[in-house]
Structure formats: C-alpha cells, structure tokens
Amino acid sequence: MATYLFDFDGTLVDSMPTYVAAVLRVLDDQNIKYDKKALIKTITPLGFGGTARYYIEQFGLTLSIEEIVAQMHKNALEGYLYSVPAKQNVIKTLRALRDRGDDLSVLTASPHATLDPCLRRLGIYDLFSNVWSCEDFATTKADVNIYLMAAEKLGVAVGEMIFLDDNYNADLTAKRAGAKVVGVYDESSAEYESEIRGICDAYIRDFYELIDLKL
C-alpha cells in the first residue's frame, strides 16, 4: 500500500488561473506593479495567509493580514464553488488508487472555504483519508516541517510518503524533508518543467501515469 499526499491547485484541479487571479487582484486593486511570473512561483506554496504576509513585507501593504485574506477569499470563492474542474484523468486515477488499497490525502495552500466544497462538488472528497489545508498546520508548504508533521499524522516515515505538486518550491521543500516527490505538469508552471524534473523522483504529465509508476 502506498501513501500519497496530493497538492490541490494545479495538481488535482485545474484551478491555477482562478487561484492566481484571486491573489494578484489584491495587488492590482492597489495599483502595485510586480513581476507576475516570479511572484507566482514564490507565493503559490504560501497559501492566502502566507501570501498576505509576503505582500505586507515585500510591497508595504497597509491592510492587515486578515483583511487581505478576506479579499482573496471573496475573489476566489465563486470559481471554486461552481466552475473549477478536475484535471484530466484525476478522478479515474484517484478511484483506481483507492480501490487497490493506497492511502490518499490532500495538503494544499488553499483554505478549507474553497478546498472542501470544490472536492465535494467533484465527488472526490470522500476518497481522501485527510483533507488538509496549510492553515491546519499553522505554516506553509515552503516549510520543511509541514511535510514531517503530515507524515507523523499519516503514521509513516517521511521517506515512505509520496508527495505530488506542480510547484517547484513546494516540490523542493518536500524533497528536502525526505519525502518521495512526483512533479506534476500544469500549464501555469510549464516553463519550470525542467527545473522540477531535476529535483523530483518522477514527473507526470497525465495523472493516469501514477497507476504504473514505481518509486
């Protein structure tokens, strides 16, 4: 039996356009200029709270973390509730993995307010033993400790856990924690594919490749 820990945005669901638009709109509304590609790579593992903190530190926003997060929630909620789709072959693959006895969990930067209803709408929430947001650990996926804590909660050594993410920084941090790491193709991170391949144990462009993947 394998123990999988899945990212959500850009890994299980095709939500990165929705997620990115929600968090960048905060800066756009303040008429703040930024390097979009570099910023997305940095903030994607941070979640709403971590991104809000980063905005305050890097761009000098005078809003509180709570105010910024509330704006991000409002910007993102409709898309997650009604339109964000699962990525190709994700649902079929998750059911096949679960049917053969593998243990599946989610660890994402997205808050439960968008995460849970989206997974339920797609009919896959109950396939997971755990659905975790970074807010459950009071840290981000840029912190090595979050993967160690997740492994402890899953009851496995971190080296037995297979973590999947489309983001370079999250994959790198999970690898540093000692997890097995599978990079996942997403259009939003396509330009970093070679970098992600260079740090991961495997890389998939279609989710169904997981069925026969040996690590």
Image (tube, rainbow, N blue to C red):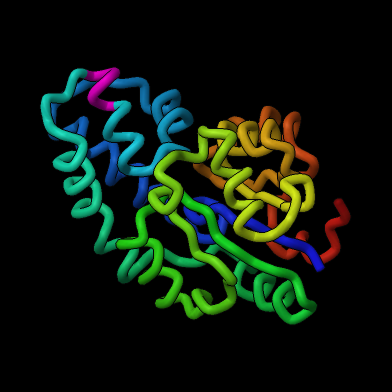
114 lies left or right of 105: left
Name the side, left or right, on which 5 lies relative to 21: right
In the image, residue 149 lies at what x, y percent?
58, 47
Query: Is 176 in the magenta?
Result: no
The quadrant where residue 48 appears: top left
103 vs 186, nearest the viewer = 103
**Residue at point 33% right, 34% down?**
51
- Picture layout, residue 118 above or below residue 182: below
Measuring from the top left, give residue 53's x and y in whole percent: 29, 30
Horizontal side, residue 170 vs residue 200: left or right: left
- In which quadrant will I find the N terminus? bottom right
Above or below, 209 relative to 97:
above
Q: Nearer the viewer, residue 46 or 168?
A: 46
Say which residue appears at 38% left-offset and 43% top-offset.
47
Report x, y in % for residue 175: 70, 35
The number of numbered discs placed on residues in the rendered structure image is: 0
The image shows residue 105 at horizontal and vertical percentages of 59, 63
Among the 4 quarters of the image, the one containing residue 44: top left
Region of the chain picked out in magenta, as a range: 55-59
